[in-house]
Image: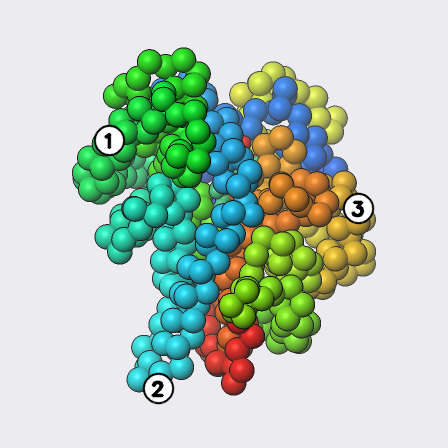
Amino acid sequence: LPPTPEDIFSNPREAYGAALRQHGPVIAVRRKGNLEYVVGPEFARHVLTCDRDFSFEEGSAAIMNLQPIMALTGGTLFRDLKDFVREGIIARMDEIVDQLYPIYDRDCEVFVDLVAKPEHESSRPDLFNHTRDTLSEATLLLLLGQEYVSKRNMRIVEDVSNGMAQLTGQYQNFSFVGKYLPWLWVLLTWINVIIIKIPFGFVRLLGPRLWVDVSRYEKIARKSKASEQEPRNVLYLIVKTYINSGEQYIGVFRRMYIAMLLLCLIFASVHTTTVVSQWVLFQLATRPEYLNPLREELLKVREEAANGELHLTAASLRAAHLLDSFIREVMRLKGDTISTMRYTTADVPLGGYVIPNGSFVTPMSSTVHENPEIFGDEPTKFDGFRWVELNKDAAMTGSAHIVFGLGRFACPGRVLAVNATVPDEATLNPEIKLIVLSLIGRATPSLLEGRFEVTDPLNTVTQPPKGTLIFTPLDRPLL
Ligand code: HEM
């Protein structure tokens, strides 16, 4: 029998896992109105990387309810997003970490000070909101520049991030309509987000200023010879790219498209990173034995400035191999199920079947992440430092860890491609490391009642665990 809708929403890991064991390695299961072909670890790499047969763009647009935008933009959305993240963020990573560290350092210090105050015993400062504030500020700085950093704009960024999370279905599994009448849910969400929230929030509040800046950047990009005069933010890079590609001026439709790119980048940077950092801190709180080695590593990688102040740089984060490994292991075992999607562009033979043209195909992440052939007899055993060793084999790391996807379409936000110790797979998003190190360098996390809950088992990528984290300040902070 195929997994029931209830199994899929409440216990997807076991439901799909059992069906794959029984009928695998390719099964077809109906979910939220679509027939999806779900594959086991044997075919995960092939499905994720063979884009001739399995389209990343169409699969991803569909899973995130973005097909109309893909259609309107002629399918360039994801390619442009990837290029702008690569050129505007990853290529400048060392400089960016220097810019971001003071924000994380300041916010974590404020957070730990707040937590330590006795009057907060009854209403604890919330780490999720706090992390989201920090990431919103960092995102404003990277995408739009320091002049945009203000409390008001941070609220706008958070609202946008939340709106995009709604639009792309991140809360869909909490709603009855979302689960059982997905077309109605998509229609209502589109009206709410695209017709109400974004125009009356982001566009009304930030639009006029962005309009002026795009026009200003247009002029700079046309004239600029000396690169040091150029603004160092992603919006400028986007404007410059279009001017350099021969556009005479940035017209209204191009401006609307740029706004869409910014909305997607805000969502990608703020929401997912906030969520994943919560998973890491929750796991750390339940595994205090990892704190000492991680703190020892912090002592080794932190750097001392000329004025004696201790801080973290991109080089420090690259050298934090134990933390890198711990984060990877948390991501491996947090229970991801359907987190990447592809769409067949032809009838494709796979595992003895032919998957028809125009079908959704997804690898079941949990079967990849808990594959006994790679992870041994106890594949679900948490071993926070296992990746320190496994990193030596970059190819294996790739196909055994698909939290960020794989190959050409893997998430561009995940790596410090520049200077990574193992090309293309080694270093995770530095923001998570900055958050974790800035916090454990000042306080010890623990969990109220020692446990947390998984709120949406079908979506552990963009839903945080639920529980209360407590932080006990260290007598002598390490940062
Ligand atoms: C820990 C946080 C993150 C997680 C778990 C995550 C996860 C993912 C996943 C699973 C994909 C789809 C890959 C595939 O289908 O093969 C993806 C794509 C993408 N991510 Fe992330 N991501 C994270 C952070 C970020 C950040 C910080 C950015 C931007 C700065 C970003 C930008 C993107 C973009 C632009 C794509 C589309 C890729 C393309 O166009 O080829 N992500 N991400």
- Badge 3 or badge 1: first in the primary sequence: 1
Where is residue 393 drawn, in percent x and y?
79, 46
Q: Nearer the viewer, residue 243 or 412?
A: 243
Q: Residues within 10 Å of mark 2 (few under 14, many from 20)?
A: few
Q: Is mark 2 within 8 Å of ligand 1?
A: no
> Is residue 451 rendered to the left or right of residue 145?
right
Residue at horizontal 73%, vertical 56%?
Answer: 387
Image quarter of residue 294: bottom right
Relative vertical location of residue 221 with respect to residue 472 in this rendering, above or below: above
> Is residue 449 rendered to the left or right of residue 251?
right
Q: Is mark 3 within 8 Å of ligand 1?
A: no
Q: Residues within 10 Å of mark 3 (few under 14, many from 20)?
A: few
Q: Nearer the viewer, residue 396 or 213?
A: 213
Identify residue type, mark 2: Pro
Identify residue type, mark 3: Asp
Residue marked by disc 3? 393
Q: Which mark is residue 118?
A: 2
- Badge 1 or badge 2: first in the primary sequence: 2
Identify residue type, mark 1: Trp
In the rendered image, is residue 93 in sight?
A: yes
Residue at horizontal 70%, vertical 52%?
Answer: 370
Residue marked by disc 1? 211
Residue at horizontal 44%, vertical 16%?
Answer: 245
Where is residue 272 drawn, in percent x and y?
47, 49
Where is residue 352 drawn, in percent x and y?
74, 26
